[in-house]
Image (cartoon, helix red, strand yellow):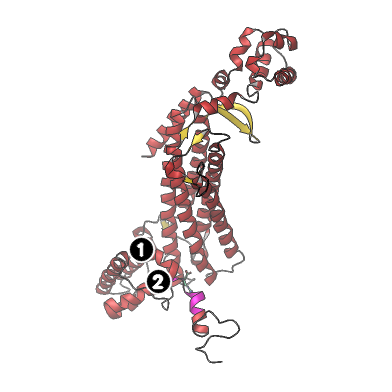
Amino acid sequence: MDKTTSNEMWGGRFASGPSAIMEAINASIDFDKRLYREDIAGSIAHAEMLGSQGIISPADAAEIRRGLETIRTEIDEGRFAFSKAREDIHMNVEARLAELIGPAAGRLHTARSRNDQVAVDFRLFVKGAATDLDRALRALQEALLARAEEHAATVMPGFTHLQAAQPVTFGHHCLAYVEMAARDRGRVQDAIRRMDESPLGAAALAGTGFPIDRHRTAEALGFREPTRNSLDSVSDRDYALEFLAAASICATHLSRLAEEIVIWSTPQFDFVRLSDAFSTGSSIMPQKKNPDAAELVRAKTGRIAGSLVALLTIMKGLPLSYSKDMQEDKEQVFDAVDSLALALAAMTGMVSDLQVNAAKMRAAAGAGFSTATDLADWLVRELGLPFREAHHVTGRVVALAEERRVALEDLPLSDLQGVEPRIGEEIYSVLSVDASVASRTSYGGTAPDGVRAQVRAWRERLDAEG
Ligand code: ARG
């Protein structure tokens, strides 16, 4: 078969023969051009080190730096012609460097391989993305804290099994997500600490015979120290996996709040109204206001968790050291980074903008005999009943209220005393939702004073971060 025509069985969509197919499967420039800043920073650090170690001449090192800076400007300004034939960002930059500065460009790749080059580029990228994620999570925490403070005493039903369980405050509910975001940040910060090592200088896989200074390049690139094993350095993608794992858990948290917003904004619940900025109308049903942003935040979780599973699967079973499989790491991470950044921005916006319908929340908080536990607790506290017996007595009171179709606090005292004669008038102060939440003063409980104290503590913690 003629090499330049495509295979008649499987080459239909390719203009020419196997070489075109090879280029299509092999080239990564369409996506890894996103690493150009990291790639150029890595090359400048490497060239300067080569110059100062006398591996290349200081004049060549200076030429290389100048050329790389020009290329960075060209790409920044959209004047760079990326070429698929040049495969990836590394070779695109290097080939352009040769056009700009001539033979000195050929010295840049001394004591280096694309294997450690891509490893350092991608680490720099993931470290930057993780730092941005941490910052975005802090912004979400601040938005949640503002709402928590404002609604420290706004009662709403607390749910288990999505059945109204006990009254809580909306502020307390918001603080639950502040805690989740804090753990997300902890995971991200932890991952940053672990990935803060430079693989540059591992060369292809075995290190190099040139007298390079890996500590110097590590420092120049802002890493704490160089990695210690060259084989591991070019094979390790744990930092990307850890980032994706942390991102997946974070996205899972966001999806839960998103789902709550979807539920709360239904006309049936009507606990919150989304601002026009974060909802859309229906093209056919004029009465509708759809929580699209919340739904999309919920959906992005699928992509982000999918990226984690994809990269785990790509890495699974790969023998040491580098294999081209690892080129497939980038699109997963890029997609997760972009999806999560967008989801977090949308969630932060929705949290800040949403209107709370406190009257609706209050009415629902009192429904479903939600203060039954308070009655049982009162029987334990005031009458000394064992909790199990109090539970039984309360069950009979609830059955009575159900039969009469009234709320617990609307049962006449005579009815209550029919079940337990020692119940007195003071029981009514326990049966209201406000009394219920105010009584939950245990550490971490929903009492408004406790919520306010937690808001203060979180503010201090965030302030201390700077
Ligand atoms: N584009 C490649 C990647 O993203 C760069 C490393 C290529 N190394 C190699 N030995 N072919 O992984």
Neighbour tally class for label 2: few under 14, some 14-19, many 20 plus, Cα within 10 Å: many
Residue 90: mark in rendering? 2
Q: Amino acid at mark 1?
A: Arg
Q: Position of residue 405 (x, y in %)?
A: 69, 20
Task: Name the residue beneath numbered marker 1.
Answer: 37
Q: Position of residue 239 (x, y in %)?
A: 50, 57
Neighbour tally class for label 1: few under 14, some 14-19, many 20 plus, Cα within 10 Å: some
Judging from the image, what secondary structure is the residue with disc 2 in? helix
Look at the image and tell me in which quarter the C terminus lies. Answer: top left
Majority SS type along the magenta span: helix
Disc 2 residue lies near ligand 1 with CB under 8 A: yes
Magenta residues (range): 22-29
Residue occupying the point 62% across, 66% down: 317
Judging from the image, what secondary structure is the residue with disc 1 in? helix
Residue 460: mark in rendering? none
**Sequence-earlier tag: 1 or 2:** 1
Residue placed furthest toward the bottom? 2
